[in-house]
């Protein structure tokens, strides 16, 4: 089952069963995966992730998905032209939580009440996709916004025991800033200044909430981008290092090995071998 909305100018919104996702995957889309029954196993940015029954996960465009074992459920795909999260974050407050958060992508648990709420919303989505009129796009956008708000509220509720509200807001802002600036700003002091805090205060806040240090999170975001570029592009290691603000290839190579445990050359070669054998690195 696949339902599509497309508007000239590259505005995309697609919903489908999980098993139909690969045939209808669109590059550059945000995705929400909802497992309704069973257990979904997939490779997410080279790491195996399992999503259980009545769980959801939100993914950004540059996260690579490879479904290993499909489950009964659905995938929502939408691009920035259909709904821009950054521009509308004042409405939904999901950036830095559901999307562009820490290196650990949050998994949302649905209790019986919210499972039923999502099921009812899904039925309205199906009905609206079949209603072709001049307000269909806005209606679909409103429904998508409602879905994102439900997910955001749930994740915040599930995180309340871990974070105080004001601390969660700072951590959320930090994640957003890193996502926007990691190629050019790679010091904790850069982000502390933007948040009007000292580097020590920022580091202490992360430590208090059992988060990886700010510096570690900056470095892991850089390393993740390096992995993606090594695997999905033909750019040389020197070019990748330069794009990530490393003036010397040797400096980038040392950084990559320290973060990943293997050299950039070995990582790229392993990806080629695995790809040729039908596997994903």
Image (tube, grey):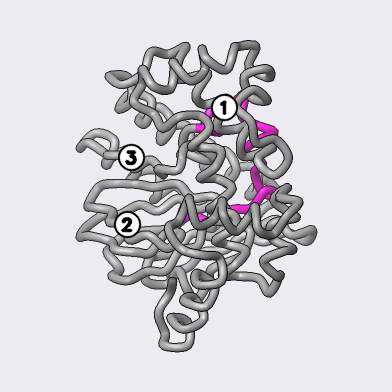
Q: Residues within 10 Å of mark 2 (few under 14, many from 20)?
A: some
Q: Is 154 located above or below residue 221 in the figure?
A: above
N-terminal-most mark, 3 or 2: 2
Q: Is any atom of residue 29 visible in this view?
A: no
Any mark on residue 49, and which?
Answer: 2
Marks 2 and 1, how far apart at CA: 25 Å
- In the image, 265 versus 232, the foreground residue is 265
- Name the spot of residue 132 as percent of width and height, x first: 62, 57
**x and y, in percent, of residue 32 in the image:** 45, 50
Q: Which residue occupies 20% across, 37% down?
A: 112
Cα–Cα span, label 1 and label 3: 21 Å
Q: Residues within 10 Å of mark 3 (few under 14, many from 20)?
A: many
Secondary element type, mark 1: helix
Graded by Cα atoms within 10 Å as few (under 14), some (14 to 19) or many (20 or more), the crowding at tag 1 reads many
The magenta region covers 76-96
Say whether residue 67 is magenta. no
Which residue carries the number 3 mark?
Answer: 108
Q: Nearest to the eye among marks 1 and 3: give it.
A: 1
Task: Read off the residue under disc 1.
Answer: 174
How far across and how far down the image is residue 145, in percent?
54, 37
Image mark count: 3
Which residue shows up at 48% across the image and 20% down it? 203
Percent across and percent down for residue 155 are 37, 31
Q: Nearer the viewer, mark 2 or mark 1?
A: 1
**Residue 99 versus residue 183: which sits nearer the camera?**
183
Which secondary structure type mostly characterizes the magenta part of the structure? loop
- Residue at 79 percent across and 58 percent down: it is 9
Residue 154 vs residue 215, the one in the foreground: 215
Q: Earlier in the sequence, mark 1 or mark 3?
A: 3
């Amino acid at each position: 089952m696949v339902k599509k909305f497309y508007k000239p100018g590259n505005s995309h919104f697609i919903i489908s069963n999980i098993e139909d996702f690969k045939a209808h995957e669109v590059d550059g889309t945000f995705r929400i995966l909802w497992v309704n029954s069973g257990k979904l196993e997939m490779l997410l940015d080279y790491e195996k992730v399992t999503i259980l029954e009545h769980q959801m996960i939100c993914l950004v465009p540059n996260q690579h998905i490879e479904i290993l074992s499909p489950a009964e459920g659905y995938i929502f795909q939408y691009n920035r032209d259909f709904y821009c999260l950054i521009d509308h974050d004042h409405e939904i407050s999901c950036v830095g939580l559901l999307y562009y958060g820490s290196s650990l992508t949050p998994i949302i648990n649905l209790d019986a009440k919210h499972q039923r709420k999502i099921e009812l919303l899904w039925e309205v989505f199906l009905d609206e996709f079949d209603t072709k009129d001049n307000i269909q796009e806005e209606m679909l956008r409103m429904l998508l916004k409602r879905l994102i708000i439900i997910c955001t509220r749930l994740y915040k509720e599930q995180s309340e025991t871990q974070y105080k509200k004001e601390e969660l807001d700072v951590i959320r802002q930090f994640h957003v800033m890193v996502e926007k600036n990691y190629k050019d700003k790679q010091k904790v002091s850069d982000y502390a200044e933007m948040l009007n805090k000292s580097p020590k205060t920022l580091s202490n806040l992360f430590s208090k909430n059992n988060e990886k240090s700010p510096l570690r999170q900056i470095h892991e975001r850089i390393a993740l981008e390096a992995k993606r570029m090594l695997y999905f592009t033909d750019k040389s290691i020197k070019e990748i290092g330069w794009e990530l603000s490393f003036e010397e290839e040797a400096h980038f190579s040392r950084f990559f090995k320290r973060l990943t445990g293997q050299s950039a050359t070995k990582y790229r070669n392993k990806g080629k071998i695995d790809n040729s054998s039908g596997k994903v690195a």
